[in-house]
Image (tube, rainbow, N blue to C red):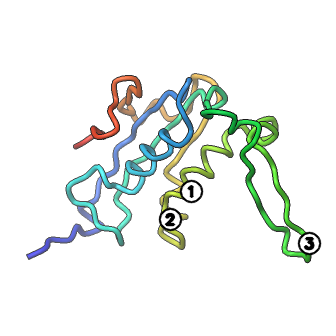
């Protein structure tokens, strides 16, 4: 018989990741797994029991190849002919954390649950962040293997 976790039994942990020289897509996949709670043995796709992730040094994130100049993000204004495009190079000048946020958002489920889970992602430029009182567990990306995500 399958046991489902109740809301009262859910506990959230805090993790800290240094994004210095990290590749956007690989970092986003690690973050999305932690935010969704897929690193826990009690994972259910319809329940939000993921953990909080604090990402620092977001301005030092990397793209592979020529994606920094050539990749395009599209959005639509809602008016006829209102499609807009922007490259990560121009986007990082205005909003340095937006490219990672978009990558993580697109790996989460669409709808109410995905929007709620995206609020568990906290991104900051530089080394300092206001979440040090939560005592986040530091995830070292250099030692982290693609198969070996943080387990509780």
How far apart in space, not on screen, are marks 1 and 2 (Cα)?
Answer: 8 Å
Left/right placement of residue 76 relative to residue 129 reads: right
Left/right placement of residue 116 relative to residue 92 reads: left
Task: Give the labeled residue for mark 1.
Answer: 105
Dot 2 and dot 3 residues touching (CB under 8 Å): no
Number of callouts:
3
Question: Which residue occupies 52% across, 47% down?
Answer: 121
Mark 1 or 3, nearer chain start: 3
Foreground: 123 or 68? 68
Dot 1 and dot 3 residues touching (CB under 8 Å): no
Mark 1 surroundings within 10 Å by alpha-carbon count, few (fewer than 14), some (14 through 19), many (20 or more): some
Foreground: 89 or 152? 89
Residue 114's disc is 2
Where disc 1 sits, the SS reads: helix
Residue 19 position in % (x across, y down): 54, 29
Residue 125 position in % (x across, y down): 65, 30
Question: Which residue occupies 38% across, 28% down?
Answer: 138
Q: Nearer the viewer, mark 2 or mark 3?
A: 3
Dot 1 and dot 2 residues touching (CB under 8 Å): yes
Q: Quadrant of the N terminus?
A: bottom left
Residue 128 position in % (x across, y down): 58, 24
Left/right placement of residue 151 relative to residue 106 reads: left
Where disc 2 sits, the SS reads: helix
Task: Give the labeled residue for mark 3.
Answer: 81
How far apart in space, not on screen, are marks 1 and 3 (Cα)?
Answer: 25 Å
Q: Nearer the viewer, mark 1 or mark 2?
A: 1
Foreground: 89 or 67? 67
């Amino acid at each position: 018989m399958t046991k489902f976790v109740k809301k009262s039994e859910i506990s959230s942990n805090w993790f800290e990741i240094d994004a210095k020289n990290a590749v956007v897509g690989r970092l986003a996949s690690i973050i999305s797994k932690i935010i969704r709670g897929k690193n826990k043995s009690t994972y259910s796709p319809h329940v939000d029991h993921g953990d909080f992730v604090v990402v620092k040094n977001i301005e030092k994130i990397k793209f592979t190849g020529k994606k920094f100049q050539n990749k395009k993000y599209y959005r639509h204004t809602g008016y006829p002919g209102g499609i807009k495009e922007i490259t990560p190079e121009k986007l990082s000048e205005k909003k340095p954390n937006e490219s990672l946020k978009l990558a993580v958002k697109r790996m989460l489920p669409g709808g109410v649950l995905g929007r709620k889970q995206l609020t568990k992602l906290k991104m900051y430029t530089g080394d300092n962040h206001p979440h040090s009182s939560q005592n986040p567990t530091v995830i070292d990306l250099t030692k982290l293997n693609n198969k070996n995500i943080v387990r509780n």
